Image (cartoon, coloured by chain):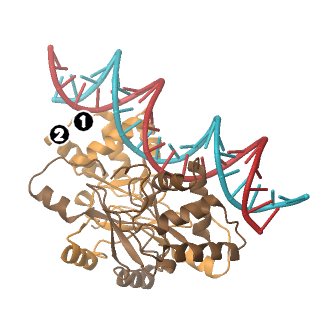
Chain colours: A orange, B brown, C red, D cyan
Amino acid sequence: MPDQGPGSAQRTAAGGRRGEEDNALVAAGIARLRARGERVTPARRAVLRVLAETSEHLSAEEVLARADEIVPGMHRTTVYRAVESLGEVGLITHVHPAHGPAVYHLAAALTGGAHLHTRCRRCGEIADVPADLLDDVAARLAATVGFRLQPDHAALTGLCRSCADARAAGDGGAAAPA
Amino acid sequence: MPDQGPGSAQRTAAGGRRGEEDNALVAAGIARLRARGERVTPARRAVLRVLAETSEHLSAEEVLARADEIVPGMHRTTVYRAVESLGEVGLITHVHPAHGPAVYHLAAALTGGAHLHTRCRRCGEIADVPADLLDDVAARLAATVGFRLQPDHAALTGLCRSCADARAAGDGGAAAPA
DNA sequence: GTTCCTGCAAACTCTTTGCACTGAG
DNA sequence: CTCAGTGCAAAGAGTTTGCAGGAAC
């Protein structure tokens, strides 16, 4: 998925901003919503836009904070219900990181950027890894026990490079997450 | 898979029963606890015994229910604190299944039965899979992004064979879990 | 004009924390 | 005798639910 535009930085460190195609993504989402007979409301539109404008993985709370700037007075509950219906329609996906709240992002079907997730037990960082990482594992599970792996639904947990290094360096205490 | 009858003794049915070596496992655990300067209390002993007597994966609530039969009046909080200290000493391990409470079992170091976990999104079943399943993935993650995978800490999510079949058969609704 | 969505309040699940007490060492 | 572990109450995070009113179609 090529990213264009003047001075646009695709998926930059602190929380990538997506490019010009935001509107297109939102529009496509809206269209799909309508096609499925779901109602298009300011709240849903806002949630969709929030997720289209970032490539970060946002918790419900974070979605609320940003959506509230678009539609002031929005309620926590509404975010939960919006992400649920947008999820059923296939517009967004959520990931469960062993600890802490679920996080949401646009579905790969829209962005074309399929990926899996890792989460660091020490610092809590959630990172993307290639979508095909678990293909072999999925095939083996299917063949041996008939389990159909959905590899993007839960994050892989462990230690990110810097936390692994820090620990190796004898750095005992650090961040909170488990 | 809710509760069983009250005064029953050993585990049967769905959850594997471990053999005669239970006492040995518990004894070894106790010894290790003492060696680490931790106190050996009835509550900790009970939690250890509960986990030694099953090969199931038990939530804190389930541990409490069974431990309470050994040490009546035991408190929820005590279970959480017991599994924490037993965990720090390396006697037990916990797994996070994307949904629902964490589950506990004896550490592989004690049982020799190292394994990973799958959890069905539809029926909630947690199953064991070979410990080496993610070895390649772990190696690739380490080599590419420096991530140190801890493959046993979170369950792999997806659909178990029967739920996958049921869904393929057009069976729309079923269990509660997500 | 229906029907679906939203806001609000409340409940719910799972887990952690503060405090006084007691039992292990 | 001392301090770590326990019970209890309360609070905390994250999420869901029931209901009344309002907006989308």
Per the image, label 2 sits on a secondary structure element best described as helix
Residue that label 1 marks: A40
- Which chain letter matches label 2? A
Disc 1 is attached to a residue of which chain? A
- First in sequence, mark 1 or 2: give its number: 2
Q: Position of residue B156 (x, y in %)?
A: 34, 67
Left or right? Give the position of B136 relative to A150. right
Callout 1 amino acid:
Val
Q: Please give left or right for residue C12 compared with residue B169 in the image.
A: right
Label number found at residue A176: none
Q: Count the marks.
A: 2
Foreground of the two, B36 or A44: B36
Residue A73 visible in the snapshot: no
Q: Are marks 1 and 2 in contact (CB under 8 Å)?
A: yes
Badge 1: few (under 14), some or many (20 or more) residues near its Cα, within 10 Å? some
**Residue B35, position in %: x, y?**
69, 77
Q: Which of these two is toward me, A160 or A74? A: A160
Q: Quadrant of residue B89?
A: bottom right
Q: Can you say whether B143 is above or below A125 in the image?
A: below
The answer for how far apart the CA atoms under marks 1 and 2 are is 7 Å
Q: Residue at x 14, y 42 (%)?
A: A35
Q: Residues within 10 Å of mark 2 (few under 14, many from 20)?
A: few
Quarter occupied by residue A30 = top left
